[in-house]
Image: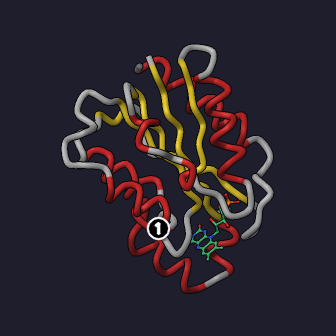
Amino acid sequence: MKALIVYDSAFGNTEQVAQAIGGVLGNQEDVTVLRVTDVRPDHWAGVSLLVVGSPTQRFRPTASISALLQGIPINSLKGVKVAAFDTRLTMREINETPVLAFFVRLFGRSAYAAKPIADRLKGKGGELIAPPEGFFVDGMKGPLVQGELERAANWAKQIIVEF
Ligand SMILES: Cc1cc2nc3c(=O)[nH]c(=O)nc-3n(C[C@H](O)[C@H](O)[C@H](O)COP(=O)(O)O)c2cc1C
């Protein structure tokens, strides 16, 4: 069974999470971890598990991740298990910036990248096998908060159980 993990990353934090997830899944599956700009049409062939991760930027996935999701043909993820994650600021940092705090209070989980990614993947026919998850960074450029790579590994183990 083939797994594809696609991520975007401006400062390397989401990439680290993607690699940690790939490390866990790699024990079980044929896994490819790819930056979104490196995905080619042949990478989709035979994929039965698709994990997509993005930094949260302006309450959304990056433009490259959104373009990738938009380009997936309708119903083409039927029979494919899917999961989504993001990286994001901690609530302490969000609360220091009133506009961020306002939108997070207003939109809740939808103010981050993971849930809209999961919704798009489901909308293309994918079967969601883990709750969308966010991993925390300390400041815009990171680093990841201590313990987040371990949390990512545990999230990936949950995917294996469902797969
Ligand atoms: C332009 C920009 C907008 C951002 N907007 C948000 C935001 O709305 N919510 C949030 O939690 N973090 C926001 N962040 C922080 C990013 O989530 C953080 O830079 C990212 O998790 C780091 O991951 P990366 O190293 O993979 O890029 C923003 C960062 C940038 C650069």
77 is higher (above) or lower (below) than 29: below
Residue at left offset 62%, top offset 21%? 26
Q: Secondary structure at mark 1?
A: loop
Counting from the top left corner in percent of width and height, residue 8 is at 59, 56
Report the residue at 72% width, 39% height from top. 149
Task: Say above or below: 121 vs 101.
Answer: above
Point out the image quarter for the N terminus: top left
- Residue 80 visible: yes
Residue found farthest to the bottom: 98
Q: For the residue marked with disc 1, what is the amino acid? A: Arg
Q: Which residue is mark 1?
A: 60
Q: Nearer the viewer, residue 66 or 122?
A: 66
Beta carbon of the mark 1 residue lies under 8 A of ligand 1: yes
Seen in the picture, residue 37 relative to 107 is either above or below; the reply is above
What is the quadrant of the C terminus in the image?
top left
- Residue 68 on image: x %, y %: 41, 56
Q: Is residue 100 left or right of residue 69?
A: right
